[in-house]
Amino acid sequence: MSIEKQIKEATDILNNISEDQTVPRNIRRAATQSLTTLADKEMEVHVRAVNAIELLEDILGDPNCPYHARTLIWHVITRLELPTDGDRDDDGDEDEEYEEDDYYEEEEEAEWVEEEEVEEKKEEEKKVEKEDDWQPEWSDDFEDEWGDNDDEADED
């Protein structure tokens, strides 16, 4: 789908939201502002789309936003998420190039896994030590089941 078609579809939906009287005024106002942003020809298409998305994302968390309007706003946002020029090559395929910093090496992953295993072993050892150190607390006035105190029996 071409960029113009995507923006046209988004503006149609935003027009519906801005004219819907069941939608709260602040939501309609944000839809109208997004329409104005998308219509501003002084900015590039991608900049207009990003600015409109920002306006719409701000109102998504509004508890007064009706479900049908929220769904339409999400649809508009997905329509406005335009591919950048660098995402596609001449064939229309996505570029497979990536920066080395974006991905971690398998060696780093192995180190992370090893560190996690060491931490887990330490935690297990602490639990075992706590269980081994446990001893019942006895009081000096402990009476056995016959009612006699052991200390008194030793004194006789």
Image (cartoon, rainbow, N blue to C red):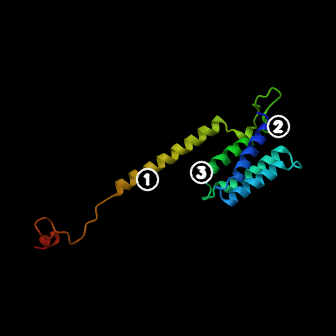
Q: Split into 4 quadrants, where in the image is the C terminus?
A: bottom left
Query: What type is the residue that disc 3 sits on?
Result: Tyr
Give the secondary structure at mark 2. Answer: helix
Tag shown at residue 67: 3
Nearer-the-camera pick, 116 or 72 = 72
Identify the amino acid type marked 1: Lys
Q: Is 146 on the left-hand or right-hand side of 95?
A: left
> Residue farthest to the right?
42
Who is closer to the viewer here, 140 or 18? 18
- Give the residue displayed 61% in from the left and 54% down from the top: 66
Dot 1: within a 10 Å radius of its alpha carbon, few (fewer than 14), some, or many (20 or more) residues? few
Residue at 79% across, 28% down: 92
The kind of residue on which mark 2 rests is: Asp
Q: Please name the residue shown 64% across and 35% down the image.
A: 106
Which residue has dot 2 on it?
A: 85
Q: How far is the residue under mark 2 from the one under mark 3? A: 34 Å
Above or below: residue 35 compared with residue 79 = below
Question: Badge 3: how crowded within 10 Å, few (<14), some, or many (20+)?
Answer: few
Q: Nearer the viewer, mark 2 or mark 3?
A: 3
Q: Quadrant of residue 140?
A: bottom left
Q: Which mark is residue 126?
A: 1
**The one of 38 and 51 positioned closer to us in this rendering:** 38
Q: Earlier in the sequence, mark 1 or mark 2?
A: 2
